[in-house]
Image (spheres, rainbow, N blue to C red):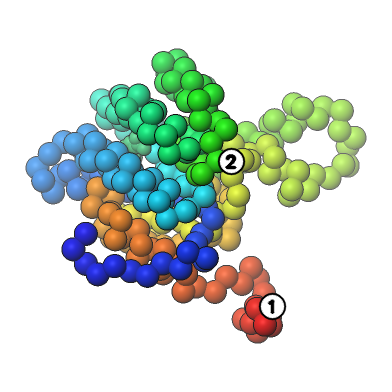
Amino acid sequence: MTEDRIHIEPGKLPRHVAIIMDGNGRWARQRGQMRTFGHAAGAETAKKIVEEARRIGIRYLTLYTFSTENWNRPPEEVEAIMQLLSKKLDKEKDNLIENKIRLTVVGDLAGLSRELQRKFKDLFEQTGRNYEMTLALALNYGGRNEVVHAVNRILTEKVNFVTGCEITEKEFEKYLYSAHLPDVDLLIRTGGELRISNFLLWKAAYAELYFTPTFWPDFDEHCFHKALADYQKRERRYGKTGEQIENEKS
Ligand code: FPP
């Protein structure tokens, strides 16, 4: 970090930060390397940002690691990402435990290899009671799929629901993959695209959005602080007027 430090107000941190880690492929290509080289660098960045989030006191961090649409990538790239993930789970296990980080997944784990499922199951058991921070990996995840999956769970579990019975938002949320996470406060996307790309559609309904052209492997602690400082300058109104928010403060 060469630039000046940015002031972050400890009392005004977003509770849940979600990140679309985009730009690995372009970062690698710029260096005349294979896309998978970019993913490996991206995994290092993920580690740095998790550590920094934990250090400053972010309670929930969700990383968009592999979407339902990412299966359409060349099979070698999909395989390389899965192998990288598997290697990192082994490598970071002790760090997660030591730093009291709970690891969870949002998405359909059943679509991953048996080996990965086994590793995740073990990590859930080993880290499930950790309380300092929750790190959620969005894996085999799509926002629309999450909503449809929730509807299907409701239809299966509530077969005896009387026709005409209404479901509330609060009840519905319990069936989402992301049920264990609070609403997203800050959604960061690296890599220059200005899209949500099917990420946490329900939980990010009121998220503050932060886009940066920086490719994910170049996104360091300083970039993270800049996003947090930007978030802290925003006024979150949830449909109310600015005057109402001011009155509530006083
Ligand atoms: C987007 O960049 C990145 C992905 C689809 C994969 C994300 C995976 C990692 C960062 C590595 C594994 C992470 C962990 C947490 C172990 P892109 O390939 O779409 O880049 P491009 O837009 O430049 O092509």
Q: Label 2: which residue?
A: 178
Numbered circles on residues, count? 2
Question: From what the image shows, is residue 153 above or below residue 9?
Answer: above
The three-letter code of the residue at mark 1 reads Glu
User: x, y percentage for residue 140?
Assistant: 46, 32
The three-letter code of the residue at mark 2 reads Ser
Choose between 17 and 25: the one closer to the eye: 17
| Contact, mark 2 vs mark 1 (Cβ under 8 Å) | no
Q: Is residue 117 visible?
A: no
Report crowding for label 2: few under 14, some 14 to 19, many 20 or more residues within 10 A (C-alpha): many
Choose between 200 and 58: the one closer to the eye: 58
Taking the image as four quarters, which one is ligand 1 found in?
A: top left
Quadrant for the N terminus in the image: bottom left
User: x, y percentage for residue 121?
Assistant: 51, 21
Residue sitting farthest toward the left:
32
Q: Is mark 2 within 8 Å of ligand 1?
A: no
Quadrant for the C terminus in the image: bottom right
Choose between 151 and 43: the one closer to the eye: 43
Instruction: Residue at 54%, 55% (x, y): give it.
Output: 15
Question: From what the image shows, is residue 110 above or below residue 167?
Answer: above
Q: Label 1: which residue?
A: 248
Instruction: Residue at 48%, 34% (x, y): give it.
Output: 103
Cα distance, mark 2 to mark 1? 30 Å
**Which structural element holds mark 2?**
loop
**Which structural element holds mark 1?**
helix
| Mark positioned earlier in the residue sequence (2 or 1) | 2
Instruction: Residue at 61%, 72% (x, y): give it.
Output: 237
